[in-house]
Amino acid sequence: MAHFVRPLALAEALDTAAYEIFFYAPERFSGYLQNKPFLTGDLASMPGEQFVANIDHGKPPFPADVIRGYVHRDRELIRTIHPDLVIGDMRLSLPISARLEGALYAVMINAYWSPYARHRSLMPALPISRIIPPWLLGPIYRRVEPLVYAIHVGVMNRVRKEFGVPALPPDLRTMYTEGNHVLYPDVPEFIPTSNLPENHHYVGICEWTPPTAKPPWWDDMLADPKPKVFVSLGSSGPLRALPALLKGLSTLPVSVVVATSGRHSEESMPAAPGSTSGMYVANLLPFTATAAVASVVVSHGGSGGLYPAMAAGTPVLGIPSNADQQLSTAFLEDSGAGIGVRVEEASETRLLGALKRLLFEPQYRLAAQEWASVYRRYDSGVLFRRFLGRALEERPM
């Protein structure tokens, strides 16, 4: 979802009288693109479930045949539109496609993947880490990480060779940041970099809230006097941690607000308001508004759930699984505005301990509120328009 939301937030910040915008996204997001003032279209893509399954098993997120197919589709679109600038978020084929078509390309990626950010070797959750504790595997993973990176980049280099494009060095960070420009949907205080080239740009956290109706129980939830814990594991969070999380929450004097994101049915959750559970459940909820009335947000720890919560001044419990979420959660812990519990270690006891600290130790909320004020200093629309002015003015004719 984050890879769809961030480009959309930037597209909506533009004046369509000044820019002709073409926005292509997977069909599953088409409901969010109704009545936009710019041209939209479906972008053929691998099912999101397959993407999540690949990274959960430590595989490259996109097989070679998928990247190859993406390149052909990208090139067709570029030839049809003749864009002055192409922007992609986790569309790993675009560095190949844009190069072959002579198009200016900007890639969106979080700054913790930048070669200019502090490198953190964090083992993602893998099948083996469910058996052997991650703290034991960590030193081994740090030794083999260059090989892991080489395997992932090797899939991309195989396709690049087929299209006559030079190979990339075996570094995942280089692959993720390949483009004429790099846009970081972050702020430099939260994810600092050093010696950043002029073609790398921070554009703020790219806040965007989908038009989501408030459920019938919304006013009852607001009137509920108990502190609220908002649980939203999103489209890629670890559902296997949910039973232990809910069991731990049931022992606390809180009300629980859950957004299922369509990954588990509302009927499968404990009873909704009016019962002793104090549980409020909906498929989708207005994230920013819900986070603003919560005392704690529980998410997968990735930037898509982390940034909106902190922008609302609410501390976060991150339960990360994949590498991206692990990196984001590490910076969350550095910030003082939250706590991370790896999914393999997400027992009821650990989760309950983290929740109690976030609920009852005030330094976490104070830190989140301070970060909210930092985020407000970076207007993504202003930063993006400033970037476009420079990039399009300097593009080769």
Image (cartoon, helix red, strand yellow):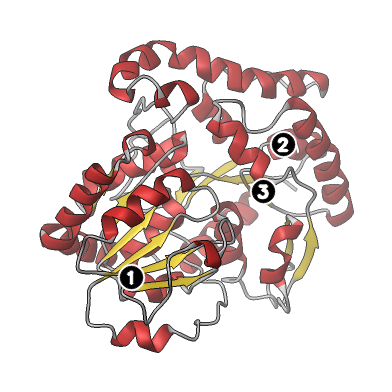
Mark found first going from the N terminus, 1 or 2: 2
Q: Position of residue 286 (x, y in %)?
A: 47, 74
For this view, does 371 lie left or right of residue 93? left
Mark-to-mark CA distance, 3 and 1 = 59 Å
Query: Can you identify the residue that label 1 sits on?
Result: 277
The residue to which callout 3 is attached is 395
Percent of width and height locating residue 14: 61, 71
Q: Amino acid at mark 2?
A: Ser
Residue 377 image offset from top left, x and y in percent: 32, 66
- Mark 2 neighbour class, 10 Å CA radius: few under 14, some 14 to 19, many 20 or more: many
Visible in this render: residue 197? no
In the picture shown, does residue 343 fall above or below 25?
above
Distance between the alpha carbons at the discs numbered 2 and 3? 21 Å
- Of circles 2 and 3, the one toward us is 2
Q: Horizontally, is 307 left or right of 157 in the view?
A: left
First in sequence: mark 2 vs mark 3: 2
Q: List x then y, in percent, for residue 203.
A: 46, 56
Q: Which residue is mark 2?
A: 93
Residue at 68 percent across and 73 percent down: it is 18
When asked about the image quadrant of residue 359, the answer is: bottom left
The 10 Å Cα crowd at callout 1, few under 14, some 14 to 19, many 20 or more, is some
Callout 2 secondary element: loop
Amino acid on which disc 3 is placed: Arg
Residue at point 34% right, 39% down? 193
Q: Characterize the local packing of mark 3: few (<14), some (14-19) or many (20 or more) Cα atoms within 10 angstroms.
A: few
Mark 3 or 1 closer to N-term?
1
Relative depth, front residue between 178 and 34: 34
